[in-house]
């Protein structure tokens, strides 16, 4: 149950951060311009875009991990933990972009859901591969124990 509470707190934090002015591209641009005054405006726009999209990938990749581990510790969801994690992260990503469309300082974009999906898919692939490797190792250990 604690894992699901962590998921809920993380999702609430995402939405609260989105609501705050500091989550906008303008704020990111101001910070970068202050830290790197030598950047041209075109370089600045490029780096703002890269940083913000990397943030999407990381935030939703991490959400996928949180939901996956919560689902693996839930008896009814354990078998479907990975699809549940992917679906839940995608639903939150879509809800977040929809919410951003209603905020003055943000401009929600459905293409960002695709970028969120890149983080979700990367983490889901890593979790799937990790599970396969663990299962393979478990089979080898059990086989060696029988011999």
Image (spheres, rainbow, N blue to C red):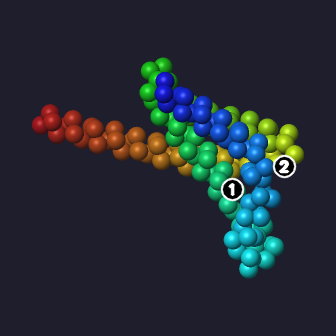
Looking at the figure, which quarter contains the C terminus?
top left
Q: Quadrant of residue 120?
A: top right
Identify the residue at the far front of this view.
Answer: 34
Q: Is residue 83 left or right of residue 99?
A: left
Q: How many C-alpha atoms fall within 10 Å of the one at disc 1: few (<14), some, or many (≥20)?
A: some
Residue at x-position 70% and y-position 74%: 36
Identify the residue at the far left of this view.
Answer: 147
Quickly name the residue at label 1: 53
Q: Is residue 99 left or right of residue 11?
A: right
Q: Which mark is residue 105?
A: 2
Residue at x-position 80% and y-position 59%: 26
Identify the residue at the far top of this view.
Answer: 76
Q: Is residue 126 above or below residue 47?
A: above
**Viewer-side residue, 63 vs 28:** 28
Please tell me which of labels 2 and 1 falls first in the chain.
Answer: 1
Residue at x-position 84% and y-position 49%: 105
- Where is residue 20? Give x, y as percent: 76, 45
Q: How many C-alpha atoms fall within 10 Å of the one at disc 2: few (<14), some, or many (≥20)?
A: some
């Amino acid at each position: 149950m604690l894992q699901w509470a962590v998921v809920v707190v993380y999702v609430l934090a995402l939405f609260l951060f989105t609501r705050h002015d500091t989550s906008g591209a303008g704020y990111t641009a101001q910070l970068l311009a202050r830290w790197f005054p030598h950047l041209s405006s075109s370089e600045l726009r490029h780096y703002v875009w890269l940083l913000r999209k990397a943030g999407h990938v990381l935030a939703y990749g991490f959400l996928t991990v949180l939901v996956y581990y919560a689902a693996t510790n839930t008896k009814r969801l354990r078998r479907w933990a990975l699809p549940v994690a992917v679906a839940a992260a995608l639903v939150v990503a879509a809800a977040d972009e929809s919410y951003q469309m209603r905020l003055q300082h943000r401009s929600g974009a459905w293409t960002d859901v695709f970028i969120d999906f890149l983080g979700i898919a990367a983490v889901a692939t890593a979790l799937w591969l990790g599970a396969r490797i663990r299962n393979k190792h478990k089979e080898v250990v059990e086989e060696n124990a029988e011999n």
